Image (cartoon, rainbow, N blue to C red):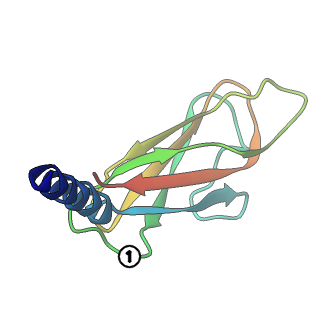
């Protein structure tokens, strides 16, 4: 019985230790007409821009990053085409690449990001 109790305590501390070493941060990202380098609303063909995101608190190791799109304002007269991907992740931040093509015109786009370490 004593060994079982000791084993349970050890397992608890191992599990708790792995939870406390994980780091998670999240926030909202957005870009729109008027921002430096914004070109998703003009011309036609492939157009892209990058957005730099800095973590509120730098990580000890390079995290994994997930992005989502929750806001888009586009010209209703054209198909809405877009691609959003994460580039260049570091301990201090990451870069988002936003792309559109053909005759799509995007006036603003945004969403959330989540970063974590295991």
Q: Nearer the viewer, residue 27 or 15?
A: 15
Residue extending furthest toward the front: 1
In which image quadrant can residue 42 be found?
Answer: top right
- Image-based side of 40 in relation to 62, left or right: right
Which x, y percent locates residue 101? 62, 28
Q: Nearer the viewer, residue 39 or 96?
A: 96
Which x, y percent locates residue 40? 66, 44
In which image quadrant can residue 45 be found?
Answer: top right
Residue at x-position 90% and y-position 28%? 77
- Image-based side of 109 in relation to 73, left or right: left
- Describe the element under mark 1 as helix, strand or loop: loop
Residue at x-position 22% and y-position 68%? 60
Residue at x-position 71% and y-position 57%? 32
Residue extending furthest toward the right: 77
- Image-based side of 4 in relation to 109, left or right: left
Q: Which residue is mark 1?
A: 57
Above-or-below relation of 23 to 72: below
* Number of other residues with Cα within 10 Å of mark 1, as a class: few under 14, some 14 to 19, many 20 or more: few
Q: Nearer the viewer, residue 14 or 93?
A: 14
Above-or-below relation of 64 to 104: below
Instruction: Count the marks.
Output: 1
Which x, y percent locates residue 117? 30, 55
Q: Nearer the viewer, residue 101 or 53?
A: 53
Residue extending furthest toward the bottom: 57
Which x, y percent locates residue 80? 75, 28
Above-or-below relation of 50 to 78: below
């Amino acid at each position: 019985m004593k060994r079982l109790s000791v084993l349970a305590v050890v397992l608890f501390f191992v599990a708790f230790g792995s939870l406390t070493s994980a780091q998670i941060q999240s926030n909202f990202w957005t870009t729109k007409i008027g921002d430096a380098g914004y070109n998703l609303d003009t011309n036609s063909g492939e157009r892209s821009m990058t957005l730099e995101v800095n973590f509120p608190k730098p990580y000890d190791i390079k995290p994994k990053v997930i992005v989502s799109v929750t806001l888009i304002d586009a010209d209703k007269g054209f198909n809405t085409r877009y691609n959003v991907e994460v580039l260049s992740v570091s301990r201090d931040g990451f870069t988002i690449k936003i792309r559109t093509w053909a005759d799509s015109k995007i006036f603003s786009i945004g969403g959330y990001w989540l970063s974590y370490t295991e």
